[in-house]
Image (cartoon, grey):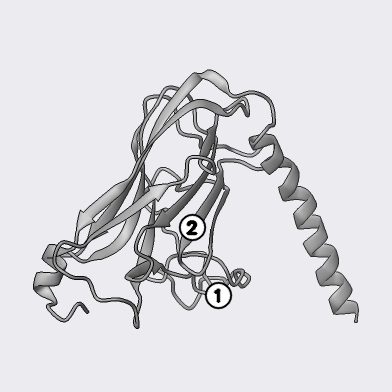
Amino acid sequence: MKSYWSSLSLTVALVLLVIPPLRSAWPQKAPDKGSSASLEARIVTDSAGCPTAVDLWLVSTSDTVKGLEALLQWDRPDLVRFAPAARLDSRKSDSTADSTTPARAAKPANSAAIDTRRGLLAGWEYVEARSDEGLTVKITAVSSLLPGRKATPIPPGKHGRLCRLPLKAVADGARPVPGDSLCVWLDAVNTRLSNASGDLFGDVKLKRGIISLAPCLASHPSGR
C-alpha cells in the first residue's frame, strides 16, 4: 500500500510539472502573423521502393521554433500504418543500448515509434508520439519544459529533418495493384508551431508526401 501511494504521489508531481510548460507553449492568444514556416511529410522507401518510414521536415522558418504539434495520417491504412513504440525503452536507441544502459519507465500503450537522432528535435526535453492504432500519429514536442533549463530551440532560417516515424505493413491488409499510390499528410487543424515567446506561428504551410507503389509492386508481385 505504501508503494502504491508513493507511486501515485510521484505521478501527480510529474503531471503538475509537465502540464504548465505545455500550456505555456500553446497559448490561447492570437497567433503571431509575422511568424511563418513550412512543414513537409516525406515517405522514405527501401531499395525496392517499398515504404519504410515517414520523415517530418522543417522546410523553412522565419522565427525560432520552440514548440511543435503535428498530426499525420494515411490515405491507405489498409496497406501500411505507423509502427508502435516498444513498451520498455532505454535511454539509448536499440542499436546502441547495452546492458549497462539504465531503463526508462514503460511507455503508454498508444505510443508510436519516433526517432529523433540526427534530427532537429534531438536534444529537446519533451518529445512524444501518440497513435490511433497506427492510423494517425500526433507528435508533441517542446524544447525546454522548465525555466532555467538549457533549451535547444530551432533558430530562424534553420531547416532539415525533425524526426522519423517508422512504418509497419498491415499483415492481413489489402494488396496493392498497378497504379496504386500512397499518401501521408499533415492535418491543418492539429498542426502548429510556437516561437520563443510562446506565440503560435501565424502561417504554417503544409506539404503532403506521396509515392507510387509501382516499384514496390514490381519487386513484390504478390503485394507482400
Q: Secondary structure at mark 2?
A: strand
Q: Amino acid at mark 1?
A: Leu
* Residue drawn 85% across the image and 78% down it: 3
- Amino acid beneath label 2: Val
Task: Decide: is 161 above or below 86.
Answer: above
Q: Earlier in the sequence, mark 1 or mark 2?
A: 1
Above or below 182: residue 189: above
Name the residue at the left extreme: 218
Disc 1 crowd, CA 10 A, few/some/many (<14, 14-19, 20+): few
State the SS at label 1: loop
Question: Residue 6: x, y in percent?
Answer: 85, 71
Q: Is residue 84 visible?
A: yes
Q: Mark 1 — residue?
A: 88
87 and 152: which is toward the camera: 87
Residue at label 2? 137
For the N terminus, give its image quadrant: bottom right
Quadrant location, the C terminus: bottom left
Which label sits in the foreground, 1 or 2?
A: 2
Query: Can you say whether 48 is above or below 63 in the image?
Result: below
